[in-house]
Amino acid sequence: MSEHPYKSMPDHAFWSRGVVRPAFGEVDPVVAAKFTITRNDRVATAGSCFAQHIGNELRRAGFNYFVTEKVHPAFEEAAQGFNYGIFTARYGNIYTARQLLQLLLRAYGLFAPVDDVWQDAEGTLRDPFRPNIQANGFATWAEFRADRVQHFAAVRDAVENLDVLAFTLGLTEAWFDSADGAVYPLCPGVAGGVFDSQRHRSVNFSVGEVIQDLTSAIAFIRERNPGARFIITVSPVPLIATCLPRSVLVSTTYSKAVLRVAAEEVSNGSPNVAYFPAFEIITGNHARGSYFAEDLRSVTRAGVDHVMRLFFRHYALSEANSLPTNIAEPRDADQADADQAAREHVRAMRKAAEAICDEEALEAV
Amino acid sequence: MPAPRKSAPEAGGEKNVLLVGSSHAEVLSRAHLSLGRKKPFRLKTILLHEPRYEPWGSWVDGEFRVSPVLMRDIAKEVRSKRFSRVVMMIGGSTHFQLGAVNSPRLFDFTIPGKEELPFVSGAESVPYDLVRSLFSREEEGILKPLLRARKLTRAVSCLCVPPPVADAGKVFEHMPDEWREDARALGVPPPIFRYKIWLVYTSVVREICRKAEIDMIDPPARSIDENGYLKAQYSFDTLHGNARYGVAVLEQVEARIKAEAGAA
């Protein structure tokens, strides 16, 4: 028998040894990380809903999940549903690479979409580019404008200060405004706005377009933050619906294939752009579909655990893992101090106010 | 076990009022006593800070739990049918916690329909719905005794707590000692901020009352100045009205009872 390249290949290169033989929870398609993350690295997240898991798990594991748009400490207990901390800034789900690129341009004043705000008959204001960020929309024009300013500042803060951006590509299908090409996360009319068939058009991005948008977004961030590193993932979550005249299953396959190729193309050859195979971990044959819940879309806890286990195994710097979790860069320490001061202020006020209300010293009344 | 304090009304009396509350209710109770023979009605008061109810309410695992002894006493009194009206003035400090001393992270918000009210310069914008959400969470717990009484009788009124005073000096003068250091370092918010906080707070209480079909009685008009603040001559400290304020509220309660009797 002659020698050939496969003879020296490791187990992970073989289907039988890499996929069939290991217990399915041990299948590891990551193999090697391009770079590692320390507990001090500011890791920002953005992308489709699957990306939400990454932020949660980073925080839980004691990593420096970078959040630049935080709820005011006085309102932490009441903030559920206001989407603080779900991602690094309060941008909501970013499904397409074009949406990411346009968010960056908007945050730096380089793109101002014509369709900038939606107001319904009751006067409720919604941000077309994050229509579900507050369940009831924005209460006043002043609030809408002020929140937009704060939001863009938080995006710029993230761009300029993140060490790693974990971005999850979600969709290729999108709706846009034919007036200027502004891409919406959701079709107008679904969670606000009014659908106008003359104005609102659908698009199914090609692999070339996704590569171009993602490359441009990365270049945009690097211009402002040369040390930024990127971890690109593809969401394993299927499309909830397709706007094309075909099966959603066919559209899902196209979409994921395009995103997977785009991620490969963009990460290939770049030492600071890595592809992390969350898509393969969840959808691979080894899992036999068990990482999807009853709706065949949602990823189960076990699936998320598998993804994050491999993420930490490969991307978390082992020496750093032993560091105490309270070590932070000066900037983060200052921010943490300010938040803590505000939190302690709230606690002190509450404690004393309880005393006031229960006191019986109203003798002078 | 000692019975709830204060003068016991005669059974079957048409002008007997049951008052339930904390420090604000104590203001009313003392105002009632001060009227001597001119009392418009008999008043029985259940004070939440009586030792038998300690603690009258507390948060446990995210749920506000009310002392079962207190709930039982309220139910017993309401079921006795000796009272033509039950009035409650519960809580009323949540807004004060947010508005008496500047936060290290200055914040402000705008109120729909009152956008003309000034915004604290340089403050972080907080969503109006988030401010409401905080108050809703708290008040839906704190107002449980009120909601319990409403299940037993329609004749329930919620007395709105007084608006803030405009004078920041008075706020500083009367604030708890524990707050003074922060107040010196961070400052007392401008009156308009405290007023806005009070507006949102009362709108949340009003909404809870509306849903439960509970009558809400606003602060007496004569106690409020042209800008909506509590007049100095009606204030005790920065949170409570004084005896004069209490008397004005009792007059409102009397008017409510008369109006109801007239309608019947």
Image: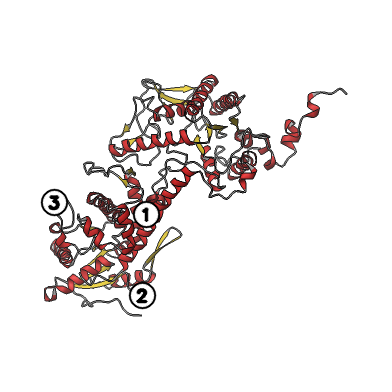
Question: In whole angstroms, how far apart are the C-alphas of marks 2 and 3?
Answer: 42 Å
Determine which quarter of the picture holds residue A352: bottom left
Determine which quarter of the picture holds residue A119: top left
| Residue picked out by circle 2 | B52
For image coordinates 55% across by 32% down, the residue present is A229
Is residue A197 visible to us here? yes
In the rendered structure, find residue A47 and report the number of the disc placed on it: none
Instruction: Point out the tag, 3 or 1, that comes first from the N-terminus.
Output: 1
Report whether A343 appears left or right of B119.
Answer: right
Q: Are marks 3 and 1 in contact (CB under 8 Å)?
A: no
Report whether B120 appears left or right of A1.
Answer: left
Find the residue positioned furthest to the right: A1
Q: Are marks 2 and 3 in contact (CB under 8 Å)?
A: no
Say few, some or many: other residues with alpha carbon within 10 Å of mark 3 (under 14 / 14 to 19 / 20 or more).
Answer: few
| Residue picked out by circle 3 | B226
Question: What is the chain identity of the residue bearing mark 3?
Answer: B
Secondary structure category for the residue under label 3: loop
Instruction: Point out the tag, 1 or 2, that comes first from the N-terminus.
Output: 2
For image coordinates 38% across by 47% down, the residue present is A72
Secondary structure category for the residue under label 2: helix
State how the image is colored. Answer: secondary structure
Say few, some or many: other residues with alpha carbon within 10 Å of mark 2 (under 14 / 14 to 19 / 20 or more).
Answer: some
Q: Nearer the viewer, mark 2 or mark 3?
A: 3
User: A89 and A1: which one is in front?
Assistant: A89
Residue B64 location, x and y as percent?
Answer: 40, 61
Is residue A122 visible to us here? no
| Residue picked out by circle 1 | B137
User: A49 and A262: which one is in front?
Assistant: A262
Question: In whole angstroms, how far apart are the C-alphas of marks 3 and 1?
Answer: 31 Å
| Vertical arrangement, residue B112 with respect to residue B139, above or below | above
Question: What amino acid is labelled 2 in the image?
Answer: Arg
